[in-house]
Amino acid sequence: MATGRTHRPATRSRGIPEATVARLPLYLRALTALSERSVPTVSSEELAAAAGVNSAKLRKDFSYLGSYGTRGVGYDVEYLVYQISRELGLTQDWPVVIVGIGNLGAALANYGGFASRGFRVAALIDADPEMAGKPVAGIPVQHTDELEKIIDDNGVSIGVIATPAGAAQQVCDRLVAAGVTSILNFAPTVLTVPDGVDVRKVDLSIELQILAFHEQRKAGEEAEAQAGAAMEAEAEAAAAAKAAGKGPDGDVPAVMPA
Amino acid sequence: MATGRTHRPATRSRGIPEATVARLPLYLRALTALSERSVPTVSSEELAAAAGVNSAKLRKDFSYLGSYGTRGVGYDVEYLVYQISRELGLTQDWPVVIVGIGNLGAALANYGGFASRGFRVAALIDADPEMAGKPVAGIPVQHTDELEKIIDDNGVSIGVIATPAGAAQQVCDRLVAAGVTSILNFAPTVLTVPDGVDVRKVDLSIELQILAFHEQRKAGEEAEAQAGAAMEAEAEAAAAAKAAGKGPDGDVPAVMPA
DNA sequence: TACTGTGAAGATATTCACAGCT
DNA sequence: AGCTGTGAATATCTTCACAGTA
């Protein structure tokens, strides 16, 4: 909706690629570890290894931030930590609310990595009246009724949704209406939000399914030599099944493997 | 290490793009919802909306799987559910072990989405002897000592690591040595694995940091009109700081904003 | 010498736009 | 008429390879 205002005007060349942004936290973590070991400088090769990427990519990524290295030497660890933190907006602190204090919500509330890097759990919110007042990770859970007030009082702009899928969109709508503009969604559902609101999703079962795909392929490759034409035969059977009956209900799993 | 055996030989055109694979679970979820409402067919437009992508992308994605639609009509929901499930390897069931039964591990064990789609929690493993025998989500926790035996007895090829960062690599090594070839890592650390082992990572704080980046940029754009040259001034100050002293320890946060 | 920073090439991914089928 | 399936165009991301420089 609205005229596609997708392109950033950008006062200066403010165009850090999304793929690069997604890796900055990785670099930051590796750098923080080096910093704790008081390592003063690091080469792109070393840092790339620590972050699990290749060095050309890392250098290219850093080139979007500016020329923060020294040729022949490498990068100053402290300086880079600061620059990346600043680029990511972590030099300010972000109050965050977590909605849905079930197993996952509690795990998130207890997760140390939250607090360590610029994020502060401002409130825990749950729909269950029984939960109200109970402390989780030292923070008392508040009832959903208070949601709007909490957002407003704390100037919260980032919300985490850890509710069941059924409640997620409704919670999302309320968060957005109350002024939240970034949402991290753990509920296994697609959230619809207005323009200008960012949603990132974390979905456990999706990750597992992707792994299963590759796992299956590994197994297939092993069998390949022996099986040979078997797979193609199966594919043809499936195609035939489609061409033929294919009733709306369920004669589908005809070719279901063991 | 080893000669980069990255390219798949692929008996036939078994080349589904990674980006497509990553979306298949999304389509599958949307289709499952339609299936539960007994919707017989769906157009690319409708399904794309339900999955939160655009229809051209969805059609392109499906084109890699085969021609499973009907022009002028759409896709048969049940049939597509089956085809995607099969492509993802979900028509067989995958025993999974979860290592590290803290808050997060318990949340994962309780997560319904696991069991629903081809995955079965075969065992919960924790290093704490106190935990041993205690049931979580109805499954008794077993001690890390049993890890190899559990993997072997259950034919586990997918492992989930939900331990603290410090223990993750060690656990990973043991899982791999015991025969696990796919790992879902929740610990905030980079895992090193041999060729042929897949690792996917889920990192809560990384997701938040990416949100913070965009959030900051939104704020910046708002202020842009008024602030104007202020940001550039700050950038220059930072550059100057670098050119000048920039001692290895920490005069860095000189420009630290409030 | 030993490293960064970056154009240019190459690989992937997305989107367009329309031919082709039902 | 209404939809899918897909080449071709475009955009984005990665990698190469080397000039530039401390």
Image (cartoon, coloured by chain):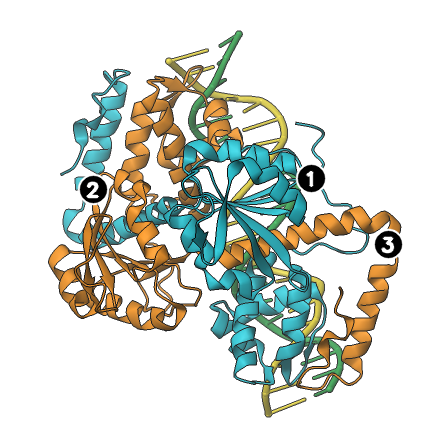
Chain colours: A orange, B cyan, C green, D yellow
Q: Position of residue B42 (x, y in %)?
A: 58, 81
Q: Which chain does the residue under circle 2 lie in? A: A
Residue found 38% across the figure and 39% down from its top: A25
Could you tell whether B143 is left or right of B257 in the image?
Answer: right
Whether residue B254 is visible here, answered yes or no, is yes
Secondary element type, mark 3? helix
The label nearer to you, 1 versus 3, is 3
Pick out the residue farthest to the left: A153
Could you tell whether B228 is left or right of A74 in the image?
Answer: left
Whether residue A2 is visible here, answered yes or no, is no
Q: CB atoms at circles 1 and 3 under 8 Å apart?
A: no
Q: CB atoms at circles 3 and 2 under 8 Å apart?
A: no
Q: Which chain does the residue under circle 3 lie in? A: A
The answer to whether A39 is drawn above or below residue B74 in the figure is above
Q: Position of residue A90 (x, y in %)?
A: 26, 40
Q: Which residue is mark 2?
A: A92
The answer to whether B46 is drawn above or below residue B230 in the figure is below
Q: Three-letter amino acid code at disc 1?
A: Thr
The answer to whether B222 is drawn above or below residue A87 in the figure is below
Q: Which residue is mark 3?
A: A227
Residue sitting nearer the eye, A53 or B113: B113
Q: Position of residue A128 (x, y in %)?
A: 25, 68
Q: Three-letter amino acid code at disc 2?
A: Gln
Q: Where does the C terminus of chain B fall, quadrant-wise?
A: top left
Secondary element type, mark 2? loop
Q: Which residue is mark 1?
A: B6
Q: CA distance from mark 3 to mark 2?
A: 59 Å
Residue sitting nearer the eye, A116 or B115: B115
